[in-house]
Image (cartoon, rainbow, N blue to C red):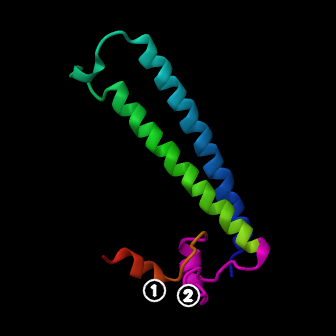
Amino acid sequence: MPDRRATLELDRIAVAAAIQDASRALGQLFDAQRDVAADDEHDPEGPTLSLQRAEAEAMLAQSRRHLDEVTAALGRLDDGSYGLCETCGRDIHPARLDARPYATECITCAQRKERP
């Protein structure tokens, strides 16, 4: 069985680095956009600064959500509820935890939520 805590800690380190990178990139885009007086929305030479900024903001938000998931999983390890489905209370299959160590639900409950 894999060391879940080590896996989650490594994931947390990687996500924290991604957040720093995305924050830095976003800051550079804000600086570049402030320095450009022209309307870059109609530039035929490629993606606009606005589009690049929106993409960087989305990546940053996604990374922050993932960090929250990993941090919550570490909390569940600490309180003994890790590996238990938050919906039905059954064990989450180890293969699911291998794929998504921060999973909060068993596959059955997760699939129920995905269906309309």
Q: Nearer the viewer, residue 22 or 72?
A: 72
Q: Residue at x 79, y 72 (%)?
A: 78
Label whose residue precedes the other's in the sequence (2 or 1)? 2
Residue range in magenta is 78-101
Residue type at tag 1: Thr
Closer to the camera in the image, 44 or 60:
60
Q: Is residue 95 magenta?
A: yes
Dot 1 lies on which element? helix
Magenta: main secondary structure equals loop
Q: Quadrant of the C terminus?
A: bottom left
Position of residue 17 relative to residue 85, above or below, is: above
Any mark on residue 88, and which?
A: 2
Residue 66 position, x and y percent, is: 56, 57
- Residue 2 appears left or right of 85: right
Residue for badge 1: 108
Q: Residues within 10 Å of mark 2 (few under 14, many from 20)?
A: few
Which residue is nearer to you in this view: 79 or 101?
79
**Residue 63: image location, x then y, percent:** 54, 50
- For residue 74, which quarter of the picture? bottom right
